[in-house]
Image (tube, rainbow, N blue to C red):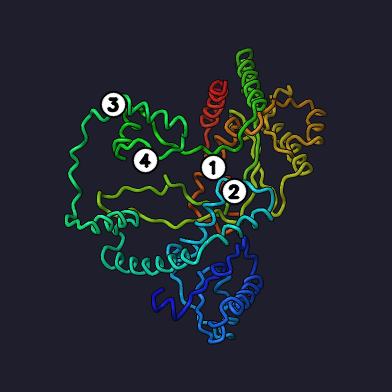
Amino acid sequence: MAIFEEQRICIKFGFKLKKVILRLTGLSVYLGIMRCLREAVRLKRPERWKNNDWILHVGNARPHTAHVVLQFLAKHSTIQIPHPPYSPDLAPNDFFLYPKLKINLKGQKFDNVDMIQAESKATLRNLSKSDFISCFNNWKKRWNGCIEAGEAFGDEALSRSRTFEWFSRFLKVREKVNDDQHTGRPRSIRCEENKLKIKELIKSYRRISIKDLYSETGLSVGLCHQIVTKDLDMIRTSSKFVPRILTKEQKEVRMDVCKNMVEMTRTDPEWMQKIITGDETWVYQYDPETKRQSSQWIERGEPKPKKARFTKSKVKTLLVTFFDNNGLVHREFIPFGRTINQEVYLGIMRRLREAVRLKRSERWQNSDWILHLDNARPHTAHVVLQFLAKHSTIQIPHPPYSPDLAPNDFFLYPKLKMKLKGRKFDNVYMIQAESKATLRNLSKSDFISCFDNWKKRWNRCI
């Protein structure tokens, strides 16, 4: 190790203890962790402990910089080195230890927390001293790289991977800084035999990489990429996240429901006009804007604009809505601190009936309206179903785990939330006021278009 590492060891919580803490739930917890850390240093680094010759490095998370924690460290004369804000690339845990740990755990499913902890401990135990020495050497290189890149190029600095690529080229006594000319390979190498071989390799393992194809076939990386993308006309895509993987029975129910819906519209063209559909959603004090919303035009060569990563705020309000193809029938906000259960939803059903009586009087007099809800537990509670049956309210079924077939989920709530994204409201009342204004601005043609889209989704499902 270099002189700096020989003279002083920088210890970050969790780094030498080899212990994963999944949650920090308060300042008193972190203060206890600091006491455990000092005891661990006393037992495992006795020479450093006797001479008080060790330095602490932690990030800028609030528990790390809390006044009581800093007081405790000052009381015991523990020197602490600063960490730059929002710089996980300069934190050894973030660029070395946790990636090493998590890459071993990815794809595994554990039965309980004890098994997660046991596997995490085993993974940490398997790390060698040379791994930690290599990490600290890498840390020093990152400091130098940060200084050199920042001073020379600022925002236009090369990426880390591109920098390593060119560094390896210059190690091989390369002098030119321009890209090499690509003369290409003879077309005969892209023969049917090689295409067939690559196709069989991909069929045997769909996640195979271009580098693995290069290793298996002996062809160049560029040639393998050309055969896959141009000759075989294949693309690499990631798995799509869906709310739930449906079973065979659930898929059959989904198709049967859609067939019944389509059949009803054929037998009665005005049937869809009778449907009132409802659901509920959370509306947040701050909901981060989408990537598309934050896009902007720039000139070629300009650095890309940056934005900080935000999450949805904890302050939120629960909105309940019901509408038909003519517009909004009923909407209400659940009081702060309450959630929807069967008793609350029973009250919502009573207020919905009153809204139908006032706003859809013809339908009300003839009892000529149909209710559509999804399968959330309050919607299917026994007392709610009894109430609807008592008042002869017809309810049409909804296929399980199918938000793409729920008008509130594919039309109303995206329309509402897209207007609110990127805006921060001072309190719940402002959230509710803006939500009401957005809903009022929706026209009758928007709701008609939604119901037409709903019909198309049934046909597409079938």
In primary-sequence order, the first of circles 4 and 1 is 4
Asked which quadrant contains residue 160, the reply is: bottom left
Question: Camera-side residue: 433 or 176?
Answer: 176
Foreground label between 4 and 1: 4
Mark 3–mark 1 distance (CA, rounded to whole Å): 55 Å
Is 330 above or below relative to 132? above
On residue 416, which mark appears? 1
Q: Which residue was labeled with disc 4?
A: 215
Label 2–label 1 contact, CB within 8 A: yes
In primary-sequence order, the first of circles 4 and 3 is 3
Is 353 above or below relative to 6? above
In primary-sequence order, the first of circles 2 and 3 is 3
Q: What residue type is labelled 4?
A: Ser
In primary-sequence order, the first of circles 3 and 1 is 3
Q: Which residue was labeled with disc 2?
A: 283
Residue 207 pos. (x, y %):
46, 38
Q: Which amino acid does label 3 sit on?
A: Cys
